Amino acid sequence: MMQSVVLARRPVGNPVETDFALLDAPLPVVGEGGFLTRNDFISLDAGFRNWMNEDSGDDVLAAMALNEPVMGLVLAEVIDSKHPDYAVGDKLMARFAWQTHSLSDGSDFIARLPYELEFNPSAYMGVLGDTGMSAYFGITDIAKPTADDCVLISGAGGAVGTIAGQIAKLLGARVVGIVGSQKKADWICQTLGYDAAVLRSGETPLAEAIQAVCPDGVDVFFDNVGGQTLEAAITNMNHRGRLVLCGAISGYGVTPYGPSNLFELITKELSVEGFMTHFRHDRYDEARAQLSAWLREGVIQSPEHRLVGIENVGKAFADLFAGENFGKTIVEL
Ligand SMILES: NC(=O)c1ccc[n+]([C@@H]2O[C@H](COP(=O)([O-])OP(=O)(O)OC[C@H]3O[C@@H](n4cnc5c(N)ncnc54)[C@H](OP(=O)(O)O)[C@@H]3O)[C@@H](O)[C@H]2O)c1
């Protein structure tokens, strides 16, 4: 039996659990050139919200169809194969659907994992997966912080933010995170080593709240949120600061807010660089090797918001937008 989570209706604004439904079907038969996986973990990634809107398809992914399985990242193991490049037992991180099993012809986005996994398998969806690598590429390739820098990170307690903050700290910077609750603020400082936190939902306007915590200004802003958060960060940037644009969750599924202070990019000579991790697919082994070394040394942690059972995948996805997650959101199947 194969179970799939389908898009029951298109979310309006933030997704809710009832936007998704569970569907049972017989296990598919593997044809010539195909292979079947058992999916052990589903990674919940906020960016996939974008392709739930009608007419939202682009070069990365087609718009998701109603009553069809929802696309996402999974940790999979090949259990049957008639494909020359995939053998039973191969472990993969792949862009398949939210399903207990996936049938593929190999044309999906697939990153191979080591045959023997050194760490807890779920780590390959988090710190060693797409989100950990987003943090790694964004911080080490683009932000390149030094000990003189103040690095500000939005979505600091989420999957990307928890890893980005720890890497920036390892590189010697002062690291400040923007989060949605006092509980998360305390957690990122006490558990992950952030130097300070800013509440995005506090009574003080965000730009002022950032200034209070970063009185000497911000040299690097690693942004997962966009919109008004990006605007508030720009106000606090130092001359020749770097804006690293990883995500814009505040604008997913709603009309995005555009910062009104882009002229400051000119007057402060700021650099702005966005990135998509999957375009660095050829460097996944390098990123995983470095992140694994840090995990082995015990200098970074891989916090998880873990739910169990495919029936909880919709709830787990909604949790991301409600800020319920501390760290990487995954569902164990
Ligand atoms: N460029 C890439 O290749 C790439 C790859 C992976 C992910 N990303 C991006 O990275 C970002 C983080 O993704 P994720 O999947 O790891 O999620 P996440 O950070 O684990 O969870 C999202 C967090 O964002 C905050 N948030 C939610 N709605 C918000 C809103 N309207 N305004 C401000 N903050 C809000 C919440 O934290 P608080 O309540 O604590 O603020 C929530 O916990 C997303 O923008 C995603 O698209 C980019």
Image (cartoon, rainbow, N blue to C red):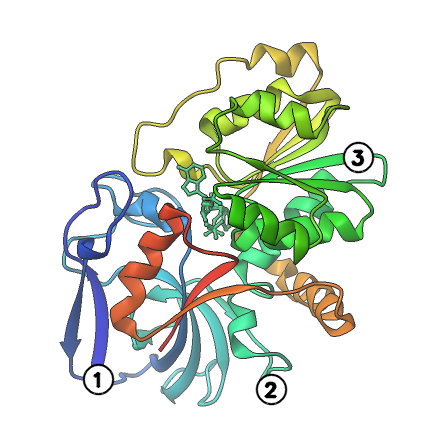
Q: Label 2 neighbourhood size at 10 Å, few (<14), some (14-19), many (20+)?
A: few
Res 188 label: none
**The disc labelled 1 sits on which kind of residue?**
Leu
**Which residue is at the front of the view, 330 or 278?**
330
Q: Is mark 3 within 8 Å of ligand 1?
A: no
Q: Which residue is mark 3?
A: 149
Give the mark, 1 or 2, whose residue is nearer the N terminus.
1
Quarter holding the N terminus is: bottom left
- Extreme residue in the right direction: 147
Q: Residue 206, image x and y in percent?
A: 53, 25
Give the mark, 1 or 3, whose residue is nearer the N terminus.
1
Give the mark, 2 or 3, whose residue is nearer the N terminus.
2
Q: Which residue is mark 2?
A: 116
Q: Secondary structure at mark 2?
A: loop
In percent of the image, x 66 and y 23: which residue is there?
A: 211
Q: Secondary structure at mark 3?
A: loop
- The answer to whether residue 135 of the structure is visible from this angle is no
271 is higher (above) or lower (below) than 48: above
In percent of the image, x 69 and y 47: which residue is there?
A: 194
Q: Residue 203, image x and y in percent?
A: 48, 26
Q: Label 1 neighbourhood size at 10 Å, few (<14), some (14-19), many (20+)?
A: some
In percent of the image, x 36 and y 47: which residue is there?
A: 322
Q: Residue 256, image x and y in percent?
A: 37, 27
Q: Which residue is mark 1?
A: 27
Question: How far, Cα to Cα, is label 2 from label 3?
Answer: 39 Å
125 is higher (above) or lower (below) than 281: below
**The disc labelled 3 sits on which kind of residue?**
Asp
Quadrant in which residue 34 is drawn: bottom left
Q: Label 3 neighbourhood size at 10 Å, few (<14), some (14-19), many (20+)?
A: many
**Which residue is at the front of the view, 183 or 325?**
183
**The disc labelled 2 sits on which kind of residue?**
Glu
Q: Residue 191, image x and y in percent?
A: 65, 58
